[in-house]
C-alpha cells in the first residue's frame, strides 16, 4: 500500500487525494514514507515498529532481579 501511494505521489497525484484513497491520517505520513524510501529503499517502507509484549511472570522476574 505504501509503495502504491508513493508511486502515485511521485507521478504527481496530490497528497490530499492519496490521503482519501488510502485512508492516511495526515500528509506528513506520506512525506515520512518518502524520506524513508529515499534513504533505505523498499526496506524502509516495511513495518519495523512492533511492540513487544512480555507476560506477567517475566516482568516480575525482571523487577525482582
Image (cartoon, helix red, strand yellow):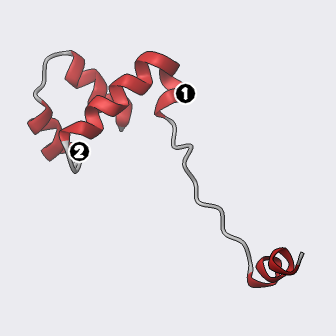
Q: Is residue 24 above or below residue 6?
A: below
Residue 43's disc is 1
Image quadrant in which the C terminus is located: bottom right
Q: Residue at x 27, y 34 (%)?
A: 30
Horizontally, residue 29 falls left or right of residue 17, namely right
Residue 27, x across and y down, in percent = 19, 38
Horizontally, residue 36 falls left or right of residue 17, namely right
Residue 19, x across and y down, in percent = 17, 42
Local SS, label 1: helix
Residue 65's disc is none
Horizontally, residue 20 falls left or right of residue 31, namely left
| Pick the front one: 2 or 25 | 25
Local SS, label 2: helix
Residue 22's disc is 2
Q: Quadrant of residue 14?
A: top left
Q: CA distance from mark 2 to mark 1?
A: 20 Å
Q: Is residue 65 above or below residue 1?
A: below
Residue 36, x across and y down, in percent = 43, 26
Q: Residue at x 49, y 23 (%)?
A: 42
Amino acid at each position: 500500500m505504501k509503495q502504491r501511494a508513493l508511486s502515485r505521489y511521485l507521478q504527481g497525484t496530490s497528497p490530499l487525494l492519496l490521503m482519501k484513497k488510502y485512508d492516511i491520517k495526515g500528509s506528513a505520513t506520506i512525506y515520512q514514507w518518502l524520506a524513508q524510501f529515499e534513504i533505505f529503499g523498499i526496506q524502509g517502507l516495511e513495518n519495523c515498529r512492533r511492540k513487544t509484549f512480555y507476560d506477567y511472570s517475566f516482568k516480575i522476574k525482571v523487577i525482582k532481579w
